Image (cartoon, coloured by chain):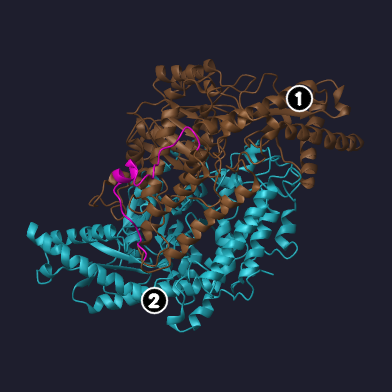
Chain colours: A brown, B cyan
Amino acid sequence: EFTTGGLQSSSIANIEKMSPDRVPLCLDLLPALSGEDTTKDFFQELVNILLSYVCKSFRRSSKVLDFHHPHQLREGLEGFSLELPDQPENLEQLLVDCRDTLKYGVKTGTVRAVDLENLFSRFTYEVSPVFILMEEVLLRKMQEIVGWSEEEGDGVFCPGGTMSNLYSVLLARYHFFPEVKTKGMTALPRLILFTSAHSHYSVKKSAAVLGIGSENVVVVKCNDRGKMIPAELESSIITAKDQGCVPFYVNATAGTTVYGAFDPLNAIADICESHGLWLHVDAAWGGGLLMSNLHRVKLQGIERAWSVTWNPHKMMGAPLQCSAILVKKRGLLKDCNQMCAEYLFQTDKHYDTSYDTGDKTIQCGRHVDVFKLWLMWKAKGSEGFGSQVNKCLENAEHLFDKLNQRPDFELVFKSKPEHSNVCFWYIPPSLRNMPPGPERNRRLHEVAPKIKAKMMEQGMAMIGYQPLGDKVNFFRCVFSNPATQTEDVDYLLEEIASLGHDICIRIETNL
Amino acid sequence: EFTTGGLQSSSIANIEKMSPDRVPLCLDLLPALSGEDTTKDFFQELVNILLSYVCKSFRRSSKVLDFHHPHQLREGLEGFSLELPDQPENLEQLLVDCRDTLKYGVKTGTVRAVDLENLFSRFTYEVSPVFILMEEVLLRKMQEIVGWSEEEGDGVFCPGGTMSNLYSVLLARYHFFPEVKTKGMTALPRLILFTSAHSHYSVKKSAAVLGIGSENVVVVKCNDRGKMIPAELESSIITAKDQGCVPFYVNATAGTTVYGAFDPLNAIADICESHGLWLHVDAAWGGGLLMSNLHRVKLQGIERAWSVTWNPHKMMGAPLQCSAILVKKRGLLKDCNQMCAEYLFQTDKHYDTSYDTGDKTIQCGRHVDVFKLWLMWKAKGSEGFGSQVNKCLENAEHLFDKLNQRPDFELVFKSKPEHSNVCFWYIPPSLRNMPPGPERNRRLHEVAPKIKAKMMEQGMAMIGYQPLGDKVNFFRCVFSNPATQTEDVDYLLEEIASLGHDICIRIETNL
């Protein structure tokens, strides 16, 4: 038994039942309710496990691997379960999970593991039995949450959301034109993609990288709230066809980077269906809301997507990098990406080689991005992630309400935030009575950068700003750390106001 | 001062001066000569630093950032030097380095860091001041080692060697045909790439992904030793031109995956120069040899490359992922990949924004792959890496000599290994007197998989096998762990022989 004894369950659901002032500071980062000492003891125990593992692997008598077949590990060996719980596990069990992960893995540090090419990565089962199965369990769970049936769904963890989006375009192109893999784009007609004006720039970047060309990405207009206008999408598709081009792919965004807007997925899916286009949903930022019963309604229709990008390293708080591309059609990833490198992916092995996932990916060897997410899921449970999302969105609403009440701030859009993004200007005294127009905009554009510079030099808080379309530089506050409390939100606002008040006097003097 | 006191320098150079039997087991993984206790104390101290950092970041009074301008950090603040030493630092200094890294970084865990999009990654200086500068210092050092002048050289760390190779093809295409970024491949003539039959499959994969098509990769013949034949390259280029295609890129391999062969770089560079082609050197595996004065001669001519892939996560022992793409021409990475996303890369910041490297990459946010390499470099020094490489190649030579002396093994190629790859068959008794031919090959093909399966179930050692061209399944032993000793090499050989002897009797019964 774990030496500190008496550790409590780390349920965030339980925490939420407590009165707000009893919520510990370390809600997001640490599983322990009992405070700093428990946390230290937990980490210390973890370190002991790691040290004993490291020292053991130096001994020549240590085994490189304790081999088990995929189905054995999958079924749960000696109580080691890979399944993802709804309710959090306790700290003691988390330590057991860590020990088991090390126990069933390959000891890559041992002096007798001389099989370099295979030991670096987790693309064959024999070298990464535990992590390959963890990836499978996580992807399956995420597909289930997206709403796909048991017969549907494939996927892979990628080095970031841009790569996940790139995979989606690559797969869509291959699905419609499999000859592209061998013949290249010169064998194809002129392909056209569609994405909204507020979408992430990775869709354009993907088109540039994949040889489609960024000009062949049609940027569809959004409404004031940053949501793609379905009628605009449809007319763009028709225009492209009239011009002799071949539309094949639509990216809909669930949670835009700046406004946190959700495109109307069902309306877009209807259009994609009637034109036979691949629907990708970029839920890199918005995917986390699927974990919340309160907020998942904003992604209604996501189950109709052919592919989905979802980054647990954003709203779910996993450390970078942790991004998944989910693909509805099984086998497509492998068909699109495999190169049949015999020297890596032998088929005459003594176990089920369908678990050798390396040939599905662009990257070959991959960093292990799944263990941290798997362990977080054990520690928080699905419900814990849900509560965390709810908490962040409450903070956003609190900020929105505050801004609405103050004369020295102005909201970029007046409707309640859908995600945790809140966009606003600080209006210095001298601009408050100025009529709207180019001169006011010119001055307002300078305010946010100056406040930010001052803020960074003080180092007490950090917040981003940017212009967007016809909107001059505005602040964008985004909550993804559930340890942030309403008092922190209030502090931030006061800080901006006090720095802004001061700085703007100097702007006026300069002008 | 560090509490355990009296810690010795971790010089591998020093270790090499000791008699062989005094070399500690943990040569590669740990810097301490004084054994397990020192190691434990060192890790414990490291953990204490981390814990105090984590606990501090929970306090609302903690600063998010202690801001310094790039030039300040670059010049070495309060003794914090980013420079990479030739000689190893001692353990005490390594702990100071770790403390300083945390001190000058952004405290992303603090409750008041609410700037999500920027906090996840290290693509702008303001959120990753330390890691961005570490990347710069490491890339600069690697370019210097490759042999480029001070005016040349750019680069980026990538998620794996396949991605680095993909970058090289992407950059070459953009260099010759910048319109591809906006117009796509349909605006271009039929492009042709060249790579050797023994090169990594990522070159073909890149052509497939980038829309060039895998059939437009011409596979150039190799000699028996797995080296590209320059005359074959030249005639392939001429043939492609005669067919109306446009050759633009040649990949030369420094250290092939299976044989560890080095293509003749100068001869290939001559051909590239005369035809005006981009020369890429895939030194993912062989790049480590540049650290050794004994072995860097094998990469002669690498300084003539337009781009180089070098994976410190292979021969230099950094944990996956740690791969660099080095590019001779400055500015090309940015021109090729930037999409000018205003909301991420504002130019009206209060510091030198040329340090915001995100727009140079495909990925946008990136995992921090540089810290581990930087710290290893501090711990080992350039000379330590050199000694490590020498040690691995000595093991390979030892194995080669042993195999040469034994009747129960056969070498795949008879010449001394150039890298640490050694390829061989185990010849079971029943095959030793069999004449060469299809029947012997058919039987021999089954031997390695069966031995490997048995070995994995025992779990005492791990080694890979594969077929290649007309060679049936053979074992490939690769040394990259300098803790491996000649006794381990001997053990492995005995192990294979004893498992092989046993298994092959059963094969004979089956036939």
Q: How many marks?
A: 2
Q: Chain of mark 2?
A: B
Label 1 to label 2: alpha-carbon separation: 69 Å
Q: Could you say whether the residue bearing mark 2 is in a helix, strand or loop? A: helix
The crowding category of the residue bearing disc 1, from other C-alpha atoms within 10 Å (few below 14, some 14 to 19, many at least 20), is: many
Q: Which residue is mark 1?
A: A403
A366 vs A80, nearest the viewer: A80
- Using residue A453 as the reference point, say whether residue A169 is left or right of it: left
What residue type is disc 2 on?
A: Glu
The location of residue A159, given as percent across then percent down, is: 49, 44
* Dots 1 and 2 on the same chain: no
In the drawing, what numbered circle is on residue B394?
A: 2
Q: Quick check: can you spot residue B249? A: yes
Residue occupying the point 53% across, 44% down: B363
The crowding category of the residue bearing disc 2, from other C-alpha atoms within 10 Å (few below 14, some 14 to 19, many at least 20), is: some
The image quadrant where one finds the C terminus of chain A is top right
Q: Chain of mark 1?
A: A
- Using residue B60 as the reference point, say whether residue A330 is left or right of it: left
Is A68 magenta? The answer is yes
Q: Could you say whether the residue bearing mark 1 is in a helix, strand or loop? A: helix
B484 vs B68, nearest the viewer: B484
- Using residue A434 as the reference point, say whether residue B77 is left or right of it: left
A46 vs B370, nearest the viewer: A46
Q: Which residues are magenta?
A: A62-88
Image vertical order of residue A473 relative to residue A68, above or below: above
What residue type is disc 1 on?
A: Leu
Q: Residue furthest front?
A: A6
The location of residue B350, given as percent across then percent down, is: 76, 45
Image vertical order of residue A140 relative to residue B130, above or below: above
